[in-house]
Amino acid sequence: MRLRNNHGVGSSSQDWPPFSRHRYSALSSQEDYRSEESEEFGPVFIQEPDDAIFSLDSDDKKVIMNCEARGNPVPTYSWLINGTVVDAEADFRYSLIDGNLIIHNASEAIDYGRYQCRAENSIGTVQSRDALLQFAYLGAFSGRARGAVSVREGQGVVLMCAPPPHSPEIIYSWVFNELPSFVAEDSRRFISQETGNLYISKVQPSDVGSYVCQVKNTVTNARVLSPPTPLTLKTDGVMGEYEPKIEAHFPQTVLAAKGITVRLECFALGNPVPTITWRKMSGNIPKKARLRKSQAVLEIPNIQLEDSGSYECKAENTRGGTAFRGHLQVYTLPQWISMINDTQLDSGEQLHWECRATGKPRPTYRWLRNGEPLNSQSRVEMVNGELIIHRLQQADSGMYQCIAENKYGAIYSSAELKILASAPVFSTNPIRLIATVGKDVSLECRPRASPKPRISWRKNDRRVQPSRRIMLLRNNTLRIINSSRSDEGSYVCRAENQFGSAELTIVLLVKEPMRVELSPIRVEVTVGESVVLSCKVTHDPSLDVSFLWLLNNQPLNTQQEGGHFEYIQTSSTADLMIRSILLKHAGKYGCRAQTSADSVLAEAELLVRGPPGPPGVVIVEEITDTTATLSWSHGVDNHSPITTYNVQARSPVSLGWQTVKTDPEPVTGNMESAMAVELNPWVEYEFRVVATNGIGTGDPSTPSRAVRTKEAVPSVAPANVRGGNGRRHELVISWEPVSEEFQNGEGFGYIVAFRANGTRGWKEKMVTSADSTTYKYRDETFPPLTPFEVRVGVYNNKGDGPFSEVVTVFSAEGEPREPPSEVQAFAISSSEIKVMWKPPNPGPGRPQGYEVSSWKDMEQEEMGKKKRTMGNETTMLLTGLDGNTQYLISVKGFNSVGQGPASSPIKISTKKNAPSLPPGNLMWIQEGNNVSLSWDPVKARDNESEIIGYKVEGRGHSQVMRTPNSAVVLTLPEGGTYIIEVRAVSEGGEGAASAQVRVLTSSGKRSLSNTIKFVFGYSQDLYFFLLCQM
């Protein structure tokens, strides 16, 4: 496929539709002119040269202008600079690589200008858009010293930059005194990016100094500095106030290309410092516009045609004002509306091409043929983008270009014109054509030829004479009406023009027509059943037949139907088996039988009975507090009458969709409305309907919109009314809340009614929260555990609902009233005290447990520890206490209501601390399994409890001995390793352990003759091995 490139300055290259025959072409529609690979075509640009800026400071003094085109034959290239052909062979500075032009040792004086690439092959020549080659450089400022500028304080001043030669644009900035101190722009100071000058509207003493203009090239980033300009203040006084004078402003006429960003400058000198304002004389300043540099610059991004107009900047201070007005004119580059396309025409015909473009100013048009200007001649007309060439000749073939241009740019549209000239040719010859008796036959004759050939027909060497049954159409087709066996034979079409002639032979055979029978032609089945459609064909045995099954006029794809369809085919029959039929399988089935002679279609209808389809959308016609009148439309019954409808509802508090009662009940299949009854008031419902027939139940309808039933008096009383607990003189009443589903309206709450047993009047209290579950009533006059009759009712904005059944609830018995009695405490050791007490007298406020408080004698009670019993125990062991310390202890009862009073504190002291020294000088003698131990007695210190004995503990044999003496004999079991240690025992507890003794007893015969004695000090570990005598 070949794409023609249309191009131009200011617009991107585009690919246009492939080469195609023009509507005037006489080429045959039955064949291609030649294969795409071998077809010759003119040059088509792939890449055209672009505008370029070359830095003269570049180390590589080589410029490359790119150009590439495709074509067959392969194109050759040449270049133009400012309209003059570049002679790359004569000038060594130029070279061509493929289509690219390379310029060596480029210089601005010689090489600056507009470049165009020409691509040429045997078909023709095309010329690219032009590309501007510029050179980037930045000269140096003049080295001549600049004179000082002297002004009065308050006077305005302009410091001139006078930039050096440069290309392209530069950016200006000013240095104050020395780098890197740059002048900051504000409402008083402004640097024009048009002139480069520094404007100071009102000079202040802080402005005195040296100023240097710095310019930067936007391409090379090179920077140069001007000689300094001193700024001094005159000493002959201060400048008085004066009205503004605009010193920097945008041009009287500003030309801008559509889409760029425009910056308009305006700055004034004056005392006081002037303020700058902007306006558009006709209309408003575009909303996208922005004010920069203290309003000295009006910036308009993405400029459009509607932004054109007169703009005014105004400078004002207290002494007066002045204004400047200029015109902004927006232009647009040409853009294509319609372009020319490749065309093929016969010689002698007329070419009519038209190209159209938009632009501002309006574009003009010119034409190129093979890269050269095309002028009006006797056969050539060119008017406003139209090109007409009469009586085309072979010499008119070639590449044409339409150029639309205004003074801001040009765009190119290219196309190839082919003038055809060839003798008639038939691509296929001979042709065998089979028809059936009674059908019309068309014998086509469409040779490839240019100009159009003369056509004649003959049959069996005799010229065909047109008749009422045999007609020669305008397109040279021979048409035979109601063909018969007598029409069989060889038909020859002869085509002839000035370049030659050709013949096409068509052999016509006429066969008996085919007949197709499809049975059954109408069948009804139920979902899940199976059926076979049988297609039988009667046809000429010399012809092969093929079958195609269709469903609702679309080819049936059995692969996508999940195994429901199966073909069974012979030479003249084709059966279609449909298994486990679904509703979607219903429709019109077609069996198309086809031979090389004709095609016949037979059709049958398959009806599938199944559950009904979903009814139409449900509409809520009327709503009350407990009913909803609903209507719907019948869905499809799928060939089985609908017997009943089931109405379902869903609410936020229901478990999905639930069947609701209806009036009437049941809803029969011929009905389209019903009333849902026994709904709950003030509940939001959705409704849907499900249809049922003799086959089954179908899918539900689309739900109705959500509607809320109307309010009603509550009808459900609270459940599980009960009470108890609470503080003394409180009556606590609780219940299970009524769910939102049964509140029946807004303003729902509870009525709590109660009376003491034996009284007549009810006290009623309102509880306004629907979520409340408890009410507490307090009265100092009734005693604990007073029985009350209690009931709880409901209400909402519509009125009062029912009360619950009356139950008996007792008032609270309160927290314990009396402290425990006979509190006693006993010191167990230096860290433990056992506390005992008796419960208070029976009565209201029974304790559920006790809390024991302990604190040191010199501390506040709040600093002490509190410990509670697990139940109604009346003893507690306090642990973790300090030794030899006096504690105060009290006990109080508690229950779920609170704590009772505490008992009077009692004092108790812990015992002195246990001995801190271990038994020392531990000695032992082992005879067999008997170990005799002895040690030095432990002496208690002054702050320690007196020694009352010793504890000998053997690990590994769970043997503990207590002795008042400092010696003991242990008998150990046989065959083990044992660890023995000794501790002193006192009233304060056990002291530190002695060093460990490790003893190993034998597992065999006991040796009576071996005696080993060990003596060791306090810190030693001794290992004893009892030798075994065999």
Image: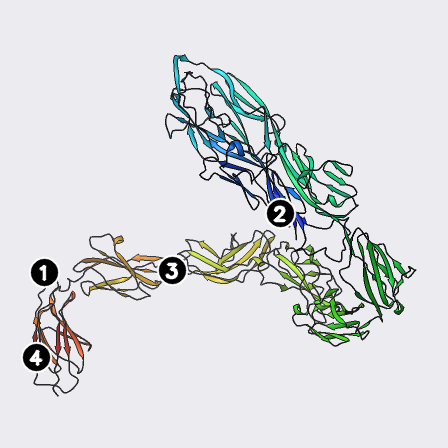
Disc sitting over residue 683 in the figure: none
Quadrant housing the C terminus: bottom left
Q: Which residue is mark 2?
A: 75
Q: Residues within 10 Å of mark 1 (few under 14, many from 20)?
A: few
Q: Residue at x 82, y 71 (%)?
A: 514
- Viewer can see residue 952: no
Q: Give the x, y percent position of residue 811.
A: 43, 59
Q: Nearer the viewer, residue 742 or 24?
A: 24
Labels 4 and 1 touching (C-beta < 8 A): no
Labels 1 and 3 touching (C-beta < 8 A): no
Q: Residues within 10 Å of mark 3 (few under 14, many from 20)?
A: some
Q: Quadrant of residue 917?
A: bottom left
Q: Which residue is mark 3?
A: 896
Labels 4 and 2 touching (C-beta < 8 A): no
Inter-mark Cα distance, 4 to 3: 69 Å
Q: Earlier in the sequence, mark 2 or mark 1?
A: 2
Disc sitting over residue 1012 in the figure: 4
Three-letter code for the amino acid on which mark 2 is drawn: Pro
Inter-mark Cα distance, 1 to 3: 48 Å
Q: Give the x, y percent position of residue 236.
A: 39, 11
Q: Which residue is mark 1?
A: 942
Tell me if residue 355 comes above or below residue 958 in the rendering: above
**Mark 4 element type:** strand
Of the residues tagged 2 and 1, which is closer to the observer? 2
In the displayed structure, does residue 209 sit left or right of residue 768? left
Of the residues tagged 4 and 1, which is closer to the observer? 4
Three-letter code for the amino acid on which mark 4 is drawn: Ile
